[in-house]
Amino acid sequence: MRSMYKFGLGIWLVLGSAAALAGYAFNFPEPVTPIARETLHMHNLVMVVILIMFFLVLGALIYSFRTHRKGAGYKAAAYSGPGNRKQWLWVLSPFFVLAFIDYVVFGIPAYHAVVMYEDTKTDAELVVKVTGSQWLWQYDFPAEGVSFTSRLSTPRDQIDAGAAKGEHYLLEVDNPLVLPVGKKIRFITTSNDVIHSWWVPAFGVKRDAVPGFLREFWATVEKTGTYRGQCSELCGKEHGFMPVVVNVVSQEEFTKWLASKKAAATPAVPTAAVEPVTQAVVAKAQ
């Protein structure tokens, strides 16, 4: 019995140390939004509870097998008729324990996470419309009058011809989405053709883009940097080539980027076409 105890303790210490030392690369990416932190907290809570339950049940099974085996001379008890109190205790106690864990230990944090994910009480400081297409993303800033597409920029020779893969293979785009740090942003998703899904793991958000529907989610990114994701809904043969890249920058940098997008979207009017109109307006005024 002592050897089994030492073996179980050793396994527990190995698993515990591995979990404690695991980097985000082997777990969740570093959370940069409140909902991502809440999701990671919920995940860790569930893992800790189910690991404890697993080892408790495993320990009870090992103890029961060793203690009540026929080789040790143990004789099974005979039960007849309706169950006694001890039988009812063993039947009902796991039910109530699991119900408590499910509805209290897991239920309350899960409810808090869902409420945070759907938090629409505060007006958004910025609205971004995300439209999925086969196979690219279109981003619109309705209030600012800015619209552009974002598609995979990984060279085809890396995909088809076996060329050396870049650092961000299949996770690089020609026009990344740019967002200001620390602002509450309302995302609206839809699709032009089939169901897509906009997903950035570090944001802790994933929302399907469904044709004919407008679906929303909210996020506040608290740290600058470049964050990458993908379409996570099987949407056709190029599904694996729909990356999401978001650059989160300071408000000043975002203002400059937005101004450059507006300038690029406004076609220049030739001077030769402007001068006759100007002269006509001046002559009419005189």
Image (tube, rainbow, N blue to C red):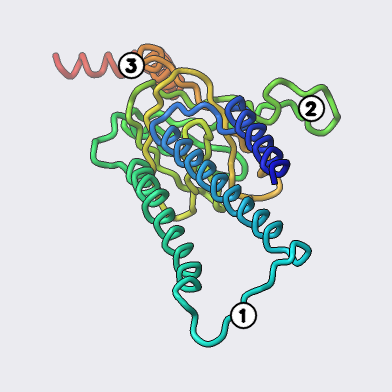
Residue sitting at x 40%, y 17% = 254
For disc 1, the neighbor class at 10 Å (few under 14, some 14 to 19, many from 20) is few
Task: Give the x, y percent position of residue 2.
Answer: 69, 42
Task: Give the x, y percent position of residue 87.
Answer: 50, 73
For disc 3, the neighbor class at 10 Å (few under 14, some 14 to 19, many from 20) is few
Q: Distance between the residues labelled 1 and 2?
A: 70 Å
Residue carrying label 2 = 158
Label 1 vs 3, first from the N-terminus: 1
Above or below: residue 28 compared with residue 86: above
Secondary structure under the numbered disc 2 in the rendered image:
helix
Label 3 vs 2, first from the N-terminus: 2
Secondary structure under the numbered disc 3 in the rendered image:
helix
Q: Which of 40 and 214 is in front in this view?
A: 40
Q: Do the residues labelled 1 and 3 touch (CB within 8 Å)?
A: no
Q: Nearer the viewer, residue 225 or 285?
A: 225
Q: How far apart are marks 1 and 3 (CA)?
A: 108 Å
| Quadrant of the image containing the C terminus | top left
Q: Quadrant of residue 284?
A: top left
Q: What residue type is labelled 3?
A: Pro
Residue sitting at x 75%, y 67% = 70
Secondary structure under the numbered disc 1 in the rendered image:
loop
Q: In which quarter of the image is residue 23?
A: top right
Please state which of the two labelled residues, at mark 1 or mark 3, is closer to the viewer.
Answer: 1
